[in-house]
Amino acid sequence: MSNFNDGAPRTPKEWLEQGHDIVPCLNKEPKVKAWTTQENYVLLDEWNKKYSNHQIGLILNGKTDFDIDNHFINRFVGKYLKSCGAIYGRKTNPLSHYLFFETEKSYKFEMPKEFESYYKDFPHGNCLCEIRSGGGHQSIVPGSKINNEKVEWNNFSGIKNYDGDLKLDISKIALSGALTILYPSKGSRDDYCTAIAGVLSKHTNWNVSDIDEFVYFISVASEDEESGRRMSKGTTSKEKTFGMPKLAEILGCNIKTIAQLFSWVGVADNGSCFTDLKVFESEPKYWKLKYKDTWITIMDSSMLLSYTKMSILILENCYEVAPVITPKDWKEIVRGLLQNVKKIEVPMESSYYNSIGLEIIEMLARFDGDTDKENSFGGLSTRGVWTNTKDNCLYTRLENITNTLITKRMSYERRKLIDHMKEKMGAEHLTINVRKKDIRVWKFSRDLLDLRNHQNKGVAEHVRKRAQEEYDKSKNAF
């Protein structure tokens, strides 16, 4: 680092004489109680008597320190940060602090936990950089040592106001660094860049040139041999619908995690509320969609495609009004969720149509024993089930089955009901003659009644076992 004789403060005396408030620190921690209040500020005489060997902590009243912790961030400072007259650091990281006369909201730019494999070996872990500002914060400044390393000015021409939007420019730097760390290997780089451009094109007011430049800088910093092909993504991204779902697919993470990164530059993506999707492969299929921290069950697949219907489910399950999402955006969100859908195998006995099957078996069992075919199907007050002792089977009409289900208020699709009876229950569709009249019926094996008894026995055993477990827990609690 260079030495300057241009008024750069390097001692407590110089910092105080230039009107700055400072606090003595050890290991970066202030050593004065209630140091954030003005009446506790340390004056020069006290510094000389009590704190001569302490670090100098600059209290950031009306000032902002842009603190860089990750070397990837340095690659973009020159791209977005306008001139700064007060830059300092240590030999191992000489360009790590940029001071301005500005007041911003303090914020740490941290990689989400889901990307731990990317950041675990960095010296500062998931922290990329930080905006530190206001009287409740302090930064160790030149005139101090950290781990026996001098904190020195790299450049000083005065702490000045920032000409522009400091928060936005730092946010661009932070997001660029994060996306460079995550930059994929060959094979998906073009889609990655297109998806970044798609998010910015759709969710910000950046112009095409801004997006082109942003993506290009990332590809160059990532040493992409084909970075020249990434120069017009702000334009070509409009030709594809790539966005957060595509980035989540490429990086193997949650959409909510991607949204967290882009929130740094003001992207408010309501779709990030929807983070997971499961499909239960029963008959019919049903779904579970994770909205924020709540799993919402969707019994009808068509509801998944209608955001109007999904909004009602959100109201019923979460007691809140659903975020505003256009049908086009909802289609993209669902497409992204389906790319990472978790498929759950469901035992046949747990499926909805198996419940219908059990109702059919209950109906057959209720009227089992009528061996008179004409009594079962010939009269006005027929019970509708005939027990054929010759083949040990039960016969009934489809109308009897559907009427039973209607009585039980069980919805069904006729085609799927018939398929379940044939494929899962072994039913056979045929015609029998009663009083010289052909009647179309369904034939079921009486073995189904044994299955019913077995399942009921299993349920009873399960209930008994759970009761015993609960009893054992309560007994052990005392």
Image (tube, grey):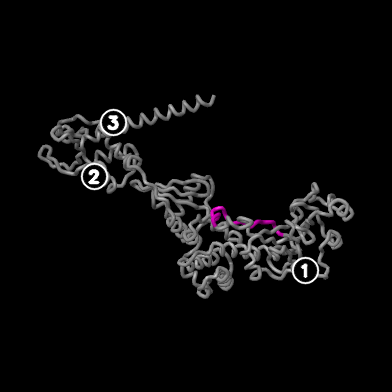
**Label located before the other in sequence (2 or 3):** 2
Would you say residue 106 sits in the magenta stretch? yes
Mark 2 is surrounded, within 10 Å at the Cα level, by few (under 14), some (14 to 19) or many (20 or more) other residues, namely some
Q: Residue at x 29, y 47 (%)?
A: 416
Camera-side mark, 1 or 2: 1
Q: CA distance from mark 1 to mark 3?
A: 87 Å
User: Mark 1 near mark 3, Cβ–Cβ under 8 Å?
Assistant: no
Question: What range of the chain is rendered magenta?
Answer: 104-117
Camera-side mark, 2 or 3: 3
Amino acid at pointer 3: Asn
**Direction bottom: furthest residue:** 228
**Residue 16 at x, y percent in the picture:** 85, 59
> Residue 179 vs residue 390: left or right?
right
* Residue 183 seen: yes
Amino acid at pointer 2: Lys
Q: Secondary structure at mark 2?
A: helix
What's the mark number on residue 422? 2
Residue at the disc numbered 3:
453
